[in-house]
Amino acid sequence: MEYDSAVNIKSFLVDIGNMSDSGTYKLYGNTTSSFTSPAFSTDLTVTDTCLFADLDETYQYWQLSLTDSSITKIQIGYLQMGDAYLQMPGIKPTATLSYKTTSSRSMSISGQVYGDIGYNYLETSFNFPFLDDSRTLGPNGWYVDGRVELKSMWEQVQNMTPVWILLWANDLDLHPPVFSVFNQTKLGIKKLRYDDNRWQVTLKVLEVK
């Protein structure tokens, strides 16, 4: 992968396709197109849905290495890399994950069931009860984005462009990343108090394939 000039990459994600968790997957960055001795390399984290890496590196040339001896022909899906990474604050702990299906079912007059098998997907919403006005340093040492950054992202992706969402970034065993769109036509950000620059917002998420 070659850019016109050096680009700062903070996040890299690629749909896992038909790969397994037994392979070796790496991302390389370099100042030249020769990757004999790349300046940067990192192992990609494997989840049920994607391979990803959090980084902060600036190079013009990038290379993805996928090695999986159990597969004769590797297939991958969507690939996203860049600096568009939004770190949201903590969610309201009463979030409900709704797993749905597009399968349709009918019953015959004598009680037999038949239908069309679709696909399963996640549809849910998350409430962020305390959102700062802009990016601030959180208590765990991470920068947490706020109203300004969220609005900027919404204006770019709206409810059409898919994004990867890490529901619980600190525990990927709890739930793998979800490739999804925002399932809403407006972004309502509520100011908590007139004398306090803090906000509240609910994001609705719809998994896509």
Image (cartoon, helix red, strand yellow):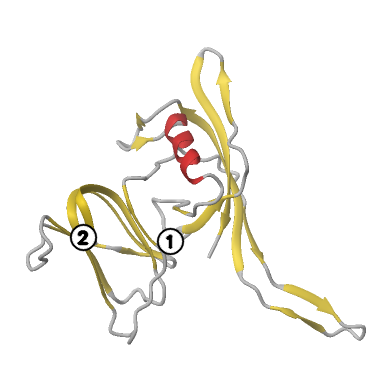
CA distance for labels 2 and 1: 28 Å
Q: Position of residue 110 (x, y in %)?
A: 91, 86
Q: Where is residue 68 in the image (x, y as percent from the top left)?
A: 29, 79
Q: Which numbered dot is residue 62?
A: 2
Q: Which amino acid does label 2 sit on?
A: Trp
Residue type of the residue flagged with mark 1:
Asp
Name which residue lies at 56% across and 23% down.
191
Q: What residue would you read off at disc 1?
A: 173
Question: Which quarter of the rendered picture does the N terminus lie within?
Answer: bottom left
* In the image, farthest residue toward the front: 4
- Numbered-mark total: 2
Is 186 placed left or right of 163 in the picture? right
Residue 64 on image: x %, y %? 25, 66
Asked whether the residues under the numbered discs 2 and 1 touch, taking CB atoms below 8 Å apart as contact, a structural biologist would say no
* Left or right of 117 on screen, residue 24: left
Q: Does residue 148 appear left or right of residue 127 in this picture?
A: left
Mark 1 surroundings: few (<14), some (14-19) or many (≥20) residues within 10 A: few
Instruction: Kindly state the secondary structure of the residue where label 2 is placed.
Output: strand
* Residue at horizontal 23 percent and vertical 54 percent from the top: 3
| Circle nearer the viewer, 2 or 1 | 2
Q: Quadrant of residue 116?
A: bottom right
Q: How crowded is mark 2: few (under 14 residues within 10 Å), some or many (20 or more)?
A: many
Furthest residue to the right? 109
Q: Which residue is rendered at x = 77% and y = 75% of the image?
A: 105
Relative to 113, 79 lies left or right: left
Q: Position of residue 93 (x, y in %)?
A: 56, 43
